Amino acid sequence: MLKKYGVVMVAAVMLASAAHAGEREGCRLCGMYIDQYQGTSAIVTSKDGRIEKTCGGADMLRLVADAGGVEAFSSVLVHDWLSGKEIAAAGATYVIGSDLVPDMIPNIIAFADQDGAKKFISEHGGQPLTFSQALLAVSPMGMTMPNRVNSAVPPPNGSVSFGAGYMSMVKDDLMMGSNKVSTAQYLAGTGTRSPLPMIPQKMEASGPMAMANYGITDRLSVTAKISDLDKTMTSTMRTSSVERVTKHKGITDLELKAVYNLWRDDYYSKFVSLMGNATLPTGDFDTTFRTMPGLQLGTGSINLGGGLLGSACFGDFWLHGEASYLANRENGDDYKFGDVGKLGAALHYTPNYDLMLGVELDATDTAKNENFGAKVQNSGGRAIMLTGVASWRFLSAFGGNFSLNGSYGIPLYEDVNLYGLGTEYVATGMLNFKHRFNY
């Protein structure tokens, strides 16, 4: 499956590359079509005469900053928002943080003079900036999207993104509580657990995943995510050395998430948002695996949660934070998965507009599952995961941009709630496409 999925991803990238040459002119940084953003587009001319256009002021500023300043170009022009005329970027007045997002965020709009900017601010809000101040107001990448920690930054109205990828998880450390143990130690036990006919040895889950995100307004976005997993549990019989392999394959529950931005500053550098999330029972809950909950593909119930999110930009760095809770309900088979509380933080470094490198830390507290109202001992627990993440934007085409995202996470601490298997790693890889339909 991994090989097949990789071929599909590579074919999509090759198709995009081949088609890019004959399509409409787009912004190199974000890929958005220039002809749709005439009111904000900028024209940058290098000293060797090469002309490049961006969809708006923010991407123009990123190009200038990356080149070391406006002196690196023979001319840098922007469009005056009021008259539509081309003006020198260095002499323009800019407005950031208004209630209009004509191209992308941060929404930096150019004006020929201060009077025009003041009139605009009186109607739409925002803060005035000089060219030098505007250069300092943009981060290289604009915004970053964490992997295991949710972002408080909603995409602009009309923005859509699609992702297709692959995930792999392995659990192969036999544990009692937070301590690794051998099979012999496990058999000796603690005297507090009920004997199981099988000793868990290894748990694997892997398969393709897909996601989609849409900006309903400049403050509200929705996301959907689903996977098609192949789960395998390897166990050894307690009374013999006979190995048993149990499998469960199919789609998982559909995950839905909505993020509403409560507050943001005028510079689009600090955000506080509310998150609401739900899981729909599209995955198979098999009563055969009541004592092996790790093999389940779904919960069998509609589950609801929410949380508070925060994001802040500090130059080349983005910081994201999350506090959330998911309440799982008892399903029709009298089984209930444990509620999950989560705290997380992510630090992302964006040295340029094509690359992001980061680390994420999240702590989860999962309650024990309940089977016919009784606690399931080999379920729930606490974990602290450290995840390395990276994102590379490698192509602008079709009015948007393509990026490759990857992550690799390992547990810093894990308590498997008396006994069970501890995590070795969780890895993901995804190809994403982002586009904005309107403004």
Image (cartoon, grey):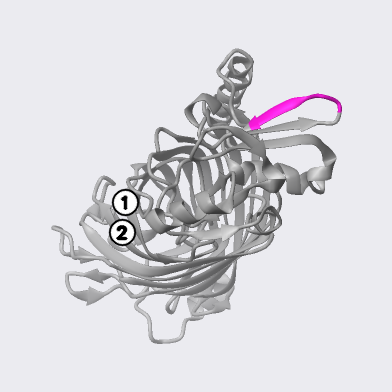
138 to the left or right of 437: right
33 to the left or right of 309: right
Q: Residue at x 24, y 51 (%)?
A: 280
The answer to whether residue 144 is seen in the rendering is: no
Tell me whether circle 1 and circle 2 mark residues in contact (CB < 8 Å).
yes
Q: Is residue 308 above or below residue 333?
A: below
Per the image, the residue denoted by label 2 is: 277
Q: Label 1: state its secondary structure.
A: strand
Amino acid bearing label 1: Leu
Amino acid bearing label 2: Asn
Of the pair 3 and 371, the residue shown nearer to us: 3
Of the pair 136 and 244, the residue shown nearer to us: 136
At which x and y percent is residue 251? Answer: 34, 41
Label 1 to label 2, Cα distance in Å?
6 Å
At which x and y percent is residue 304? Answer: 25, 62
Q: Is residue 287 above or below residue 12?
A: below
Q: Is residue 368 magenta?
A: no
327 to the left or right of 76: left
Which residue is situated farthest in the front direction here? 115
Image quarter of residue 44? top right
> Going from the N terminus, do you reach mark 1 or mark 2 first?
1
Q: Residue at x 75, y 49 (%)?
A: 65
Say few, some or many: other residues with alpha carbon within 10 Å of mark 1 (under 14 / 14 to 19 / 20 or more).
some
Q: Residue at x 46, y 41 (%)?
A: 102
Q: Is residue 23 above or below residue 297?
A: above
In the image, the segment drawn in magenta is 48-53
The answer to whether residue 98 is seen in the rendering is: yes
Of the pair 94 and 392, the residue shown nearer to us: 94
At which x and y percent is residue 193? Answer: 37, 81
Which residue is situated farthest in the right direction here? 48
Per the image, the residue denoted by label 1 is: 256
